[in-house]
Structures are given as C-alpha cells and as structure tokens.
Amino acid sequence: MSWKHMFARKDLEMLLAEMAGEHRLHRVLGPVALTSLGVGCIVGAGIFVLTGVAAADMAGPSIIVSFAVAGLACALAALCYAEFASLAPVAGSVYTYTYTTLGEILAWIIGWDIILEYSMGCAAVASVWGNYFNELLIALNKLLDEWFGGALTWQLPVIHPKFRTDPFTLLKDSTEHGMVNLPAFFVIVAICAVLVLGIRESARTNALLVIVKVSVVLFVVLIGLAFIQPANWNAIPVTERILPQERVMPKLIKKDLREADPTLSKEELDRRTAELQKRLRASYRVEWAAAEARRLREEGRLTPKEAEGLTAEVRKKYAADLPVTEAQRAAVERLLPQVHQAGENEETAHWGLLGNLGLNRWLLPLDDATRTPFTPYGISGLMLGASIVFFAFIGFDSISTHSEEARKPQRDVPIGIITSLVVCTLLYIAVSAVITGMVPYPQIDVHAPIAAAFTERAEAENSLVLKISGALIAAGGLAGMTSVLLVLFLSLARVFMAMARDGLLPKVFGKVHHRFHTPHVATMIAGGVIALVSALTPIRELAEMVNIGTLMAFSMVCAAVLILRIQRPQVKRPFRCPALFLVAPAGIVVNVILMLFLPIESWLRLSIWLVVGMVIYFAYSRRHSRLTQHLLHEIQTPRSDEPEPAC
C-alpha cells in the first residue's frame, strides 16, 4: 500500500452510488423537520447556561456582541455547508465532504474531530441538565406553597448538589466539590433508548420539544423586557468585574491552611477558607482599585479628583470585609504575592493561545482601550465570550449529517441550515440582552442564569406571574437541552455509520437495525461512554473541547467547498454559495481567530485526541479502507484491452 492511497479522494459518483445502496437510511425529513432539528440542536445549553457563564466571567453586557461574532463565523461556514450538502446529500457531513476533496487521511482527521465535537457536546449539555431539572422542582414547590397557602406538609424532592455536580467542580457558594452528576448519566441513557426506536419518532419528539422551548425563549424575551434596567448595560463600573485573581483565591487559601495545620478537618478547612477568602478578596480589591485609579490618571482618562474618588468608593464598599485580627492580616500579606502571580497566569489564559505565545503583552493595551461598562473585560473578553458561546451554534451543521434522510435534500437541506441559523442567532441576541439587562453581570447565576434571574425577581417583587415564569423557564430549559441531546446523538451515530461504511471504523458501527432502520449499535456504544463522561466532567472544559473541534471542522468545510469549486466547476450545484471566493476564505480566517482565543489546554486536549485518532488510523483504518482496497484491486486487475501473456 503506497502513501498516496492515504490522500485518495472519493468521487462524487461513488457517494451518489452509496445513496442507492440497500443499507441507506429512510428519506422521511422535509424542510420543516430539518429546520426543527437545527433549532432543536442550537437552542439549548448555550442559551440557557453558557450565556450566564460568558457574561459573568468573560464579556459582561458585550455578550450581546459575542453572540453576533459567533453567529457571523457560523454564517460563513453555513453557506459553504449548504452548497456541499445539496451537492452530496449523504450521511457524514464534513467528514464526507473532506473525503471528496482533500483525501482519506484528512477525512479521517476531521471525522475523528467531529466525533469529539458531537460526543463532548452531548456530555456538556447533559452535565447541566440536572441543574435545570432541580430549578423546575424548586419552582414547582414554591408554586404549590403559594397555591395552598403553606398547608401542604410535603414537597417535591430536590436533588442534592453533590449528586448533580461533577467531582471537579465547586458547589455553589461552597468550597466543597461535587461527587457525581447522576441526572446527566440517566438522561443520556434515556435519550439513547429513544434514538434506537427510529428517526421518525425521534424527529417527532424533537419537534414537540422545539415548540416548547422556542415558546419559552420568546416568553423570556417578552416578559423580561419589562424588567430591563438599561443601567445594567452601561453604568456598572468596570471595577466591579470579576477579576482573574479572584478565581484562584480558594485554591491558594486551602493550600496555605493545609500547610499551616495538616490536622484540620474538612468542615473547619471549608469554614476558614470561606472567611479568609472574604478578607483576601476585600484587601486585593482595595489594592487593585488604587493601582487602577493611578494608571487611569497617568493615562489622562481620569482627573486626580476622579481617581481619588474611585479609590475611596472601593475602600468604603469593602471596608467591613477587610482583615480584623493579626492572624488574618498576616495570612493576607502572605497570600497576596501568590495571588498576583497566579492572577497574571489567569490573565494570560484569558487571551487563549495568543497569551501562551506571548502576544497578549502586545495586545493588552487593546483591552485597556476598549474597557467600558459595556465591555468590562475589553476586546479579549468579548472574543473569548464569542469563542465560548460558539458552542451554542453547533446545531446547524448537524442538519447536513441527516442529508441522506431528507426527502428532497438538494432543496431542503440548505433551507434547514440557513433558516435555523438565522432564527437562533436572533433569539440568542435577544435573550442575552434581556438577561444582562435584568441582572447586573457580576451577579448572574452561572449555573442556571435565566431561570434564576426570574426566580430572584419573583421573590423580590412577590409576583405570582414571575413565580410561574420561573417554572416555565426551567421547563423550557429542560426541553431545550433534551432536544439538543436528541439531535447531537442522531448526528454522532450517523458520522460513525458513514466512517464504518468506508471501512475506517469496524463494520459494527455502521450496522442498521432491520426494523427501526437506525444505527443502533453505534448509538448504544457512544451513549455508554458519554454517560460516564457527562457524569464526571465539568461543563466548561467540555464546552471548550467542543468549540475547538467545531471551529476546526468549520474551517475545513470552507476549504473543502472552495477546493471542489476549483476542481469540479462543471458539477451541477442545486445551491451555490454566493461570493464563495470571498465567503470561504473569510470563514477560515474568522474561525481560526476564534480558535486562537481558546485556552492552551483545549489545544492540548485536541492534539491528544488527534494523536489517538492517528494511531487508530494506521493500526486499523488504513488497512480496512474500502477506497484503498478498491484502488488496489484496480491496479492488480489487468485491463480487458491488454494482450494476454504469451505461453
């Protein structure tokens, strides 16, 4: 087998021939069902959870712009997806497209990358499913108490935080970690069971869930408009943003306390950590405000009087939390240098790979120049926010994995891709505007931001309407995340099937159930692995892994469509991407820029994943590739017009 076979390309004619095979999937999806699948996958954890994470820790109110930037990156890729999906309407999405244009080994790399995207996407969504389920139970208990005037002697059971939080994540308002995310595990198992039954049943279930959650999203926007306070967008001082140094304090304090007294019990350690964290945070805030005021005064952005007022205001706010005892003062003085050093590392990480390459030192002035109440974290926060909430957009590309199940793929798939992306981008921008307008961004609950915002407002106003809203939003969040799981799992199983058809994965992954016509084996194997990952891994790490894989895939599909337009310009294209020679390069550039803002850990995890993939390729896939075997057969079989060898 020669090395050139690794770069062999699958002809379009071969793809179209596979569509007519006996193991093809049922064509039962129309444009409405495909759009519903796209919306079902897009509107989920991104809007119900990551909006809060990105707004509180990364972008502030400028999360609105972050969603627009992420939507632009997706729109450029979506136009390329639409052209290719109409040209080659078979299962496999970007994996199949890359096989046709760039060759087998690059197709394997991107297929392996897509498996990472969809599987970790499922795990990330499942990991926060339990939080919204718990919010629903809490909201229902409050409604029951309201309706029955406190006469009920029982309540719906809620899930203890330890059993809906992974072992690497701190519990809310605590220094303790969780144990296992049981709701995530069980919801994945349930989703697998639904998906094995069939695409038609899955699509109907998804359509119902989409109606529920889109209605809830519209409800959030319409009701939330009445409670928006514009000051939350443009009047919160930049000094109120969450500082990188504050994120590292709990870990440093625990280490210091353990070194001082290894015999401390867990309860005592947690108590002292919480107390010392309050003192350390107040001390750092006062020190930081003085340095910030001095810098702004030297740059001419504040007058001496304004700088003095800023320092005094921060000192007054945190005066009650400053160290009181000599022991507290000594601990704070001992820890502050460590906080400064660790904080510098956190600030570097804020710039993603750019920071690790040292470019952040050149780019930091951009942050300072663009830091306003609307963009409190500067341009890096806005772009990092876009890189994180990009996770919320991955649904539209899953439509192309269902091309083989579309009734009229050349027409319906482009409609589904573009329509779902446009609708969801508008919804995202509206919801992010509402949530940051209702709640000051430093106070946003990152675990269940939308539901928590309405619940807190309901308690403050003692409004029955808002209490009902909290329950409806929690229910919508559950519906949203459940539909995301359905679509991502559908897509993941079909990528497995496409790769198994080509011989790059064992045949069992491509096996289609004789009755349900679904890739049931691939669904069950993937489900078992994802259930464990979602129960034990934090959502932020999962989301970052999904994002870097997706951005890489989008860059590849933009390149693949551009190459095929050059190589095969004569092929009939039912949908042609407008201005492709501008759109495709722009798509590559924008997606790569967003990748650069992801942390170095995401790049390392992606590298490890791809190394494992290459080991599998050379150990198994290369020898079992159907395309390679076909090419070798052609070489070894003499042509009919060649003379017979002489006796």
Image: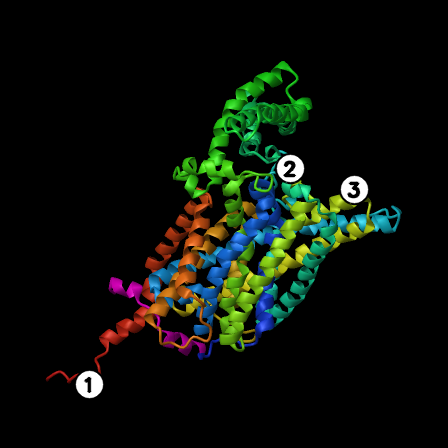
Q: Residue furthest top?
A: 326
| Residue 236 - label | 2
Residue 276 visible: no
Q: Main secondary structure of the magenta part?
A: helix
Residue 238 visible: yes
| Residue 460 - label | 3
Using the numbered discs, state the Cα–Cα distance from disc 3 to disc 1 in whole angstroms: 88 Å
Q: Amino acid at mark 1?
A: Asp
The residue at which mark 1 appears reads as: 641
Instruction: Answer left or right for 510 relative to 441.
Output: left
Callout 2 secondary element: loop
Label 3 or label 2, whichever comes before in sequence order: 2
Residue 584 on image: x %, y %: 41, 61
Q: Amino acid at mark 3?
A: Ala
In magenta stretch: residue 395: no
Callout 1 secondary element: loop
Residue 318 on image: x %, y %: 66, 25
The residue shown at (39%, 64%) is 581
Callout 3 secondary element: helix
Report the span colored magenta.
Answer: 1-19
Using the numbered discs, state the Cα–Cα distance from disc 3 to disc 2 in whole angstroms: 21 Å
